[in-house]
Image (cartoon, grey):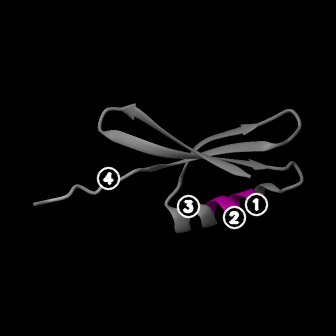
Amino acid sequence: MSAVDRRPPRPGVEWEFDSVIFPPDFSRNVVRKLLVERAEQGGWVLDRVRIGHDGKRRVTLRRKIIRAVRTA
C-alpha cells in the first residue's frame, strides 16, 4: 500500500517520502481521517494528492529526516 523513498532536495535537508494509494470507494472523509491519523502518529506532512481518471487517490507524504550528530 505504501513505498518509502528518500531523496535530498538540497544540501543539508533530507526528506523521507511515502506514497499511499487509496481506492475510489473510500470517501473523502475516510481518506482524511486516515491521513490525519498517519500525520499525528508518524509526523508525516501532505506533499501531493493526485486523483486519477479511475478515481484512485495517489497521496505523497513527506517528513524531514533529522540526523543525530555525535558530540565529543
- Residue at the (54%, 68%) spot, across then down: 41
Please state which of the two labelled residues, at mark 4 or mark 1, is closer to the viewer.
4
- Label 4, label 2: how far apart the Cα atoms are: 30 Å
Residue drawn at x 89%, y 53% as measured from the top left: 25
Judged by its main secondary structure, the magenta piece is: helix
- Identified by mark 4, the residue type is Arg
Q: CA distance from mark 1 to mark 3?
A: 15 Å
Residue 42 lies, in percent from the top left, at 53, 63
Q: Residue 24: where, in percent of width, then height? A: 87, 48
Amino acid identity at mark 2: Lys
- According to the image, label 1 marks what residue? 29
Direction front: furthest residue: 72
- Element on which disc 4 rests: loop
Q: Is residue 29 above or below residue 55?
A: below
Query: In the rendered structure, which segment of residues is drawn in magenta?
Result: 30-36
Q: Secondary structure at mark 3?
A: helix
